[in-house]
Image: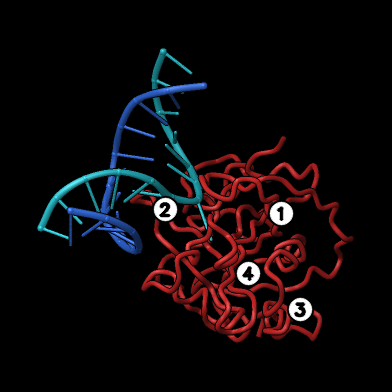
Chain colours: A red, B cyan, C blue
Amino acid sequence: MTSPHRANKSTTSLTRAFYGRNTVKVAKELLGKILVRELHTSMLEGIIVETEAYRGYDDPASHAYRGLTKRNEVMFCEPGHAYVYFTYGMHYCLNVTTEPAGQAGAVLIRAVQPLKGIAEMKRRRRVEQIKDLSNGPAKLTQAFAVTKALNGHDLTTGKTLFIVRNLHHQEPDIRSGNRIGIRAGVEKRWRFFTRGNPFVSKRW
DNA sequence: CTAAAGATGTCCT
DNA sequence: GGACATCTTTAGA
């Protein structure tokens, strides 16, 4: 089997214990990890270079701020699951759930650096420039074929979508900034990105 | 039931 | 820098 999921111990999925911690901490530590998507015909990989933390009752920008709803229920469940939501009538965004079960939290994956399956990503995105493939939250879900069908998917046991450590990767130089596209909670600096990486969606 | 906003991307000027 | 596409979800009447 060529699946990186079981290639060896150091490339197994991040554990539930990793995800089940403070959301801001998890958001920072996800930088440099590898997002893996296995399709029937191809395997897609990308290095996570930009994330944002969203918590619960203390975070007015969060979908979970006003409590449990049908849409955000995954944010309140076990950590290590995919929270995928549909927005602006046409886009999907991918988050990973955090904090202990019962406590809301999720990290939005905002950008990845394409690593494998670039031809497939180009086909899905209908663009030629590699830099345009996954430098934004809705761009990467399109490139990685992530839709609402994956909402609630367990990233720690699933084989079609998961996140692994990057073996040959030095610790990224992490920068923080204000979260993008929100109206409330703008003062929190809960956006994290790898300094200088060209696939970060925006920089300042 | 109705309305308005939305964790965005693309194209245009 | 701004318009606009497009539709689900949520809040409020």
Q: Are marks 1 and 3 on the same chain?
A: yes
What is the C-alpha distance between the residues marked 2 and 1?
20 Å
| Nearer-N-terminus badge (1/3) | 3
Q: CA distance from mark 4 to mark 2?
A: 20 Å
Q: Is residue A46 left or right of residue A169?
A: left
Cα distance, mark 1 to mark 4? Answer: 14 Å
Q: Any mark on residue A91, and which?
A: 2
Label 4 – label 3 distance at C-alpha: 11 Å
Disc with the residue nearer the chain's start (2 vs 3): 3
Question: What is the secondary structure assignment of the residue under circle 2?
Answer: strand
Q: Disc 4 on helix, strand or loop?
A: strand
Q: Looking at the image, is mark 4 or mark 2 nearer the viewer?
A: 2
Task: Kindly identify the amino acid type of the residue bearing the numbered disc 1.
Answer: Val
Q: For residue A36, which numbered disc appears in the image?
A: 4
- The disc, 4 or 3, on the residue closer to the chain's N-terminal end is 3
Describe the element under mark 1 as helix, strand or loop: strand
Type of the residue with mark 2: His
Q: Nearer the viewer, mark 1 or mark 4?
A: 1
Up-down: is A37 above or below A191? below
Any mark on residue A11, and which?
3
The one of A175 and B1 positioned closer to us in this rendering: B1
Which residue corresponds to mark 1?
Answer: A49
Answer yes or no: are tags 1 and 4 on the same subunit.
yes
Observer-nearest of A203 and A156 = A203
The kind of residue tagged 4 is: Val
The crowding category of the residue bearing disc 4, from other C-alpha atoms within 10 Å (few below 14, some 14 to 19, many at least 20), is many
Q: Are marks 4 and 3 on the same chain?
A: yes
Query: Between disc 4 and disc 2, whose residue precedes?
Result: 4
Q: A174 above or below C5?
A: below
> Identity of the amino acid at label 3?
Thr
